[in-house]
Amino acid sequence: MTSKLKLLGSGSIAAALLIAAAPAYAAGTASGTSIVNNVTVDFQVSGVSQTQRTASNTFLVDRVVNLTVAEVGNVTTNVVPGQTAAVTAFTLTNTSNATLDFALTAAQLAGGTAAHGGTDVFDVTALGIFRDVNTNGTYDAGTDTAVTFIDELAADAAVTLFLVGNVPITATNGQVAGVRLTATAREGGTAGSQGAAITQTTGANTAGVDTVFADAASVGGDTARNGSHADEDDYTVVTATLTVTKTSKVISDPVNNATNPKMIPGAVIEYCIAVANSGGAAASNVVINDPVPGQLTFTAGSILLNGTTTGATCNADGTAGGSYSAPNVSGTIASIAAGATRTLVFRATVN
């Protein structure tokens, strides 16, 4: 575009600064546009008007290839072990001055610091890329389609893309999995098919439509002006982490009663099952099932649920509940908050 640059001249410096400060959208006029500039010259000789002289200059606008891939929301995606279809979202914007195809690649980090802190230590499974078909910004299974490229994305147009994967059941609280989405500009091809790789024009400006890469460097070793751009997001496991402790104590025996009782036949034993949640999320529908040994006889009506502890001591302050179906004592605690401990207490007699 040499002719256009000459017409602008040095007086265009201020305008160029304004353009640089503007958002990075498509570079104005579409590539391939023919810009014609006609000039006329009128003159006289001895006061007599002479035939007007004219000149014309025509050039084609060259193609600027530029794009951005940006994570949506700039926050980690909280997940739980065993979760399926865990979603992170990205926006791909074609900031070129031409309609282009874009090849897509999903990758998982191999260690190192993830996008939102923490160290990448696990991979999600079945990681795939899906296009937001109904443009509602939310992943809709069965509606949003799996893609490996974006076809014919117009200049200044954007599309929402989802990375969707499954979280291993073995993942633990606080673990992080980093993911990366990369888009690479492609050209040509028929509708519905991925176009060919794009090569930047080298050397001097030509009479045809040249190609200039203008993309910025991004993540994962992506360099500037290579026709690609990438961004990263991550999954952070936020889950309950339960530990179970079972203790017993003698309440009474037939000889000593409640004074220094011993575990002799006829003694009443109190069991405490303490469930502690050291994770980052509440545990819900916690079902406890405890078979009573054959040497014991369950004490009817003795089950207390949702009690607390003081240190390692069971407070036996729960409420009556649970059930007994020989030989099983069972009870359900609706929720154990992160950092809390709740108990099931019951009694039995030594046979």
Image (cartoon, rainbow, N blue to C red):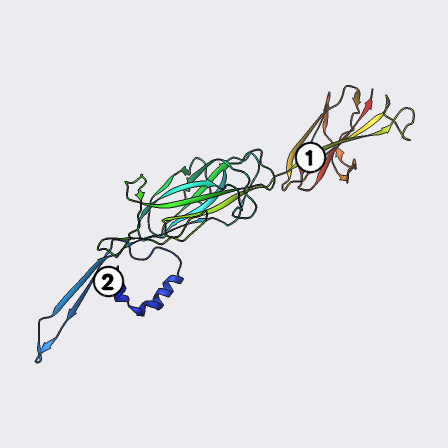
Three-letter amino acid code at disc 2?
Ser
- Identify the residue position indicated by label 1 in the image: 243
At x 28%, y 41%, the residue is 189
User: Quick check: 126 left or right of 340?
Assistant: left
Task: Tell which of 93 and 115 is nearer to you.
Answer: 115
Residue 258 in the image: state x and y as whole percent. Answer: 89, 30
User: Quick check: 214 left or right of 289?
Assistant: left
10 Å neighbourhood of mark 2: few (<14), some, or many (≥20)?
few
Task: Tell which of 65 and 201 is nearer to you.
Answer: 201
Residue 66 in the image: state x and y as whole percent. Answer: 36, 52
User: Quick check: 38 left or right of 327?
Assistant: left
Task: Tell which of 297 and 60 is nearer to you.
Answer: 60
Whether residue 245 is visible = yes
Residue 148 in the image: state x and y as whole percent. Answer: 38, 39
Residue 183 in the image: state x and y as whole percent. Answer: 39, 45
Q: Quadrant of the C terminus?
A: top right
Q: Which element carries disc 2, helix, strand or loop?
A: helix
Q: Which element carries disc 1, helix, strand or loop?
A: strand
At x 76%, y 21%, the residue is 293
Three-letter amino acid code at disc 1?
Thr
The residue sitting at the front extreme is 203
> In the image, is residue 28 above or below residue 167?
below
State which mark lies toward you, 2 or 1.
2
Q: Quadrant of residue 143?
A: top left
Label number found at residue 3: 2
2 or 1: tag closer to the N-terminus: 2
Q: CA distance from mark 2 to mark 1?
A: 75 Å
Instruction: Please say if the residues under marks 2 and 1 sit with CB atoms less than 8 Å apart.
Output: no
At x 90%, y 28%, the residue is 257
At x 29%, y 57%, the residue is 29
